[in-house]
Amino acid sequence: MTEVPNVTAKINNQTQYLLTFGSNSIIEGHFSNAEPNSTQIPAGEQLQVFFASSGPAKDVGCEGNVTYQFTDQNGNPQEVTLFYKDPYLGNNEFSATVPSGLTCTSEGPLHGDTVSVTYTLSGTVS
C-alpha cells in the first residue's frame, strides 16, 4: 500500500429538498467538510461535501457516516445518512439510508486507497 486510505465524497442532490449538514460519526480516521458551502446542498446541485482519511497510525483505514437533514413537502423533518468505509485491507464500502420515496446510489470503487465516491439522491418523500 503506497497511499493512506482516504475518501473524497460528492452529493448529487437530484431532489426538491435543500440538504443541510447535520452531523458526522467517525469510526476510524479523520473527517472534514470539503468546503465552507458544503454544509448546504441545494436541490439540483452537486457539491464536494467531505474528505475522510486514515489516522496517523499505520495499518488504519477510514470509516464513518455523515447525516444531512431536510424538511419534506409536508413540513416533516427528514434525514439522509451516508456511510463510507475505506479500510487498510479489504473492500471499500459505500451506502446510504434514506426516507421512503427517496433513492440513493453510491458510485465508488471497490478497491483502492485514494478514492472518490458520488452519492446521488433522487425521488420525493412518500
Image (cartoon, rainbow, N blue to C red):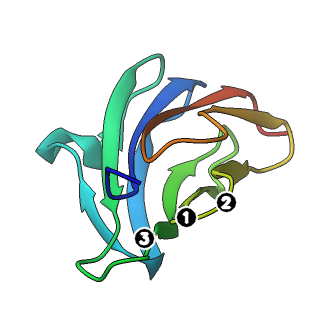
Residue in the image at 16% along x and 42% along y: 35
Q: Pinpoint residue 97: horizontal percent, then vertical percent.
A: 74, 55
Q: Which residue is mark 3?
A: 24
Q: Nearer the viewer, residue 117 or 101?
A: 117
* Residues at discs 2 and 1 in contact (Cβ within 8 Å): yes
Which image quarter is the C terminus in?
A: top right
Tag of residue 18:
none
What residue is disc 1 on?
87
For marks 3 and 2, the one nearer the N-term is 3
Looking at the rendering, which quadrant does residue 77 occupy?
bottom right
Q: Amino acid at mark 1?
A: Pro
**Of callouts 3 and 1, which one flags the residue occurring earlier in the amino acid sequence?**
3
User: Looking at the picture, does residue 66 appear above or below residue 14?
Assistant: below
**Residue 2: x, y in percent?**
33, 50
Under mark 2, the amino acid is Gly
Q: CA distance from mark 2 to mark 1?
A: 6 Å
Residue at the spot of label 2: 90
* Residue 61 at x, y percent in the picture: 46, 69
* Location of residue 13 with respect to 72 vertically, above or below: above
Q: Position of residue 105 (x, y in %)?
A: 71, 31
Q: CB atoms at circles 3 and 1 under 8 Å apart?
A: no
Q: Residue at x 74, y 50 (%)?
A: 98
Secondary structure of residue under mark 3: strand
- Cα–Cα gap, marks 3 and 2: 23 Å
Q: Bin the neighbour count of mark 2 within 10 Å (Cα to Cα): few under 14, some 14-19, many 20 and up.
A: few
Q: Give the label, 3 or 2, closer to the camera.
A: 2
Residue at screen point 51% across, 68% down: 63
Q: CA distance from mark 3 to mark 1?
A: 18 Å
Crowding at label 1, few (<14), some or many (≥20) Cα neighbours within 10 Å? many
Number of labelled discs? Answer: 3
Left or right, 29 with reference to 17: left
